[in-house]
Image: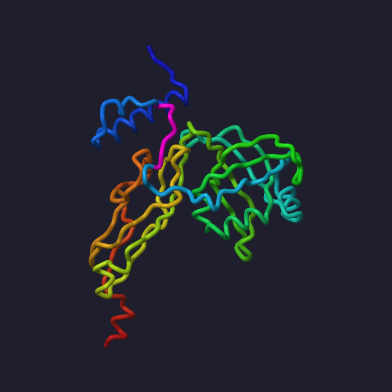
Amino acid sequence: MLIHRSPLAKTLNLRLRLRFRFFSQSAATAAEIHEDPLAPLSYDGFPRPDPKYAETILAIPRAYSGTKISVQERKVGRVPSIVFEQEDGQHGGNKQLISVQTNQIRKLVNHLGRSFFLSRLFDLEVRPEFGSGDVIEKVRVLPRLLHLHAGTDAPLNVTFLRAPSHALLKVNVPLVFRGEDVSPGLRKGSYLNTIKRTVKFICPADIVPPYIDVDLSELDVGQKIVMGDLNVHPALKLVQSKDEPVCKIAGTRVSDQKRSK
């Protein structure tokens, strides 16, 4: 007999498997293995979002879509946007048309950087109109897509994912490279060939890392770091191949060789 499980049941089962794998690789006791699967996940020493940039994004409902409507919205300082659900990291639904404030999105993108804006959770409040004290809906969201004007970098539209605790989200997590000053290869005059600046993971909504540290401090000439080498929270699932290169310490640049002659 086939048993059909709800998305919530599948997610709880995933959490149980993740927790068992994490604790079985450590010196945890048997009591810790049987902890409550409904308890919130913890960042456990991994990078966590900086509360300095915690901000509620304000929005208003939008009844219609289309090119003309989008142009009108932008003329009055609003960014046409969509909120939808993506619980399994792949498929969306429950779409809602909204508009957000251009100045607020521009400020957040300028402060955080585009890739960091797209890997951070925000509270989203939908109100009848900007300036109203009434709240129609308040939900946690992850910005999934952001289109900017090629000439001015003004935000043209934003897509948000609802991010309740049981959701799984596909996220391009930015990489932060550290240890360049002590890398043996770089100290010898070689250079860092950066192949990836973000890496795609499926993340539980409660554990969306703002970035992943990439340690270059022991990397010598000719050595590389692949995706499987990245130190990430055990609840994250790598979408790409673990053998894909992230960066490499390459030999002296051709331009540097010509200068030395």
23 with respect to 203 (left or right) = left
Establish if 140 lies above or below 214.
above
**Place of residue 90 in the rendered image (x, y in percent of width and height, measured from the top left):** 47, 37
- Front residue of this view, candidates 159 and 129: 129
Quadrant where the image shows the N terminus: top left
232 with respect to 91 (left or right) = left
**Place of residue 128 in the rendered image (x, y in percent of width and height, measured from the top left):** 75, 39
Quadrant where the image shows the C terminus: bottom left
Question: Magenta includes 40?
Answer: yes
Q: Residue at x 29, y 25 (%)?
A: 31
- Front residue of this view, candidates 228 and 41: 41
Where does the magenta region start and end? 37-43
Q: Residue at x 48, y 31 (%)?
A: 166
Establish if 137 lies above or below 258.
above
Can you tell which quarter of the image residue 32 is in? top left
Q: Residue at x 41, y 16 (%)?
A: 3
Can you tell which quarter of the image residue 198 is in? bottom left
Q: Which residue is drawn at 30% across and 84% down?
A: 258
177 with respect to 78 (left or right) = left
Q: Outermost residue toward the top?
A: 1
Establish if 236 lies above or below 220.
above
Can you tell which quarter of the image residue 20 is in? top left
Total of numbered circles in the picture? 0
Question: Magenta includes 84?
Answer: no
Q: How is the image coloured?
A: rainbow
Main secondary structure type of the part rendered in magenta: loop
**Place of residue 144 in the rendered image (x, y in percent of width and height, measured from the top left):** 53, 46
- Front residue of this view, candidates 232 and 202: 232
**Place of residue 49 in the rendered image (x, y in percent of width and height, measured from the top left):** 48, 48
